[in-house]
Image (cartoon, rainbow, N blue to C red):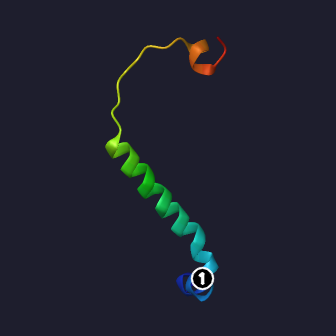
Amino acid sequence: MWLRAYYADPKRLDEPSALATEENAVSWVLSKAKVTDKKVKFDDLMGNA
């Protein structure tokens, strides 16, 4: 029943659609990222240098 309510008003699908797009974008970026560990002082990390 709640599924029909979503499809009855296409604007209701905007939020789930945006969430799915965001998740896909994050997954893609993370799959392309090269990660290296680096020791950083807490104050430098927080911009309190």
Q: Is residue 3 above or below residue 30?
A: below
Q: Quadrant of the C terminus?
A: top right
35 or 6: nearer the viewer: 35
Q: Residue furthest right?
A: 48
Q: Quadrant of the N terminus?
A: bottom right
Q: Is residue 25 above or below residue 17?
A: above
Residue 6 percent location from the top left of the image: 58, 81
Q: Is residue 4 above or below residue 31?
A: below
Q: How many marks?
A: 1
Q: Residues within 10 Å of mark 1 (few under 14, many from 20)?
A: few
Image position of 46 (left or right of 40): right
* Quarter where residue 12 is shown: bottom right
The residue drawn where x is 57% and y is 75% is 13
The residue drawn where x is 48% and y is 62% is 21
Badge 1 amino acid:
Pro
Q: Which residue is mark 1?
A: 10
Element type at mark 1:
helix
The residue drawn where x is 43% and y is 13% is 39
Residue 30 percent location from the top left of the image: 38, 43
Residue 28 percent location from the top left of the image: 37, 51
28 or 6: nearer the viewer: 28
Image position of 43 (left or right of 26): right
The residue drawn where x is 54% and y is 68% is 16
* Quarter where residue 25 is shown: bottom left
2 or 9: nearer the viewer: 9
Residue 18 percent location from the top left of the image: 54, 64
